Amino acid sequence: MATVDRFFKEGQSAFYKPKKYGRFMHHACNPYTSTSFRGKEWQRGFNNSYGRNLKKRHKFPGTKTHGHVVSPL
């Protein structure tokens, strides 16, 4: 796996593994500097997963996610 893929996949997996703090679930923050190569690739992976999840949610409106009903925009 190339170095680029490593940070990209790290960002992707961070989106799908939120941490629980008390009653709330929080997504991880970018562990790298936002101006660094690593930080940009991590953010690209996180954003990619966010976009895919958003498309999936809009494909099936009215489905429940985290206890909330999702409605199309």
Image: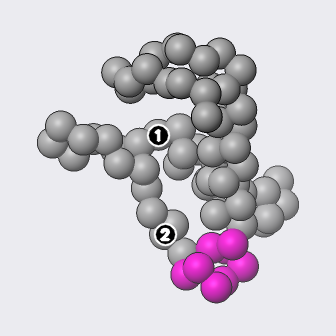
Residue toward you, 73 or 55: 73
Q: Position of residue 70 (x, y in %)?
A: 50, 24
Dot 1 surroundings within 10 Å: few (below 14), some, or many (20 or more)?
few
Instruction: Tell me residue 19's x, y (percent).
Output: 34, 44
Q: CA distance from mark 2 to mark 1?
A: 14 Å
Instruction: Give residue 18's quadrant in the image.
Output: top left
Q: Is residue 25 above or below residue 33?
A: above
Task: Tell me the magenta residue range.
Answer: 33-40
Mark 1 lies on a secondary structure that is: loop
Which residue type carries mark 1? Answer: Lys
* Apparent side of residue 18 relative to residue 25 in the rendered image (left or right): right
Decide if residue 17 is on the left or right side of residue 73.
Answer: left
Q: Residue at x 38, y 24 (%)?
A: 68
Residue 66 horizontal/vertical position (percent): 38, 26
Residue extending furthest toward the left: 22
Callout count: 2
Give the residue at x 71% y 61%.
Answer: 44
Residue at x 34%, y 21% (from the top left corner): 67
| The label number, if any, that marks residue 45 in the structure image | none
| Residue 11 figure quarter | bottom right
Q: Which residue is mark 2?
A: 31
Location of residue 40 with respect to 43 vertically, above or below: below
Which residue is the site of mark 1?
Answer: 17
Q: What amino acid is found at the position of numbered circle 2 in the picture?
A: Pro
Would you call the spot at circle 2 few (<14 residues within 10 Å), some (14-19), or many (20 or more)? few
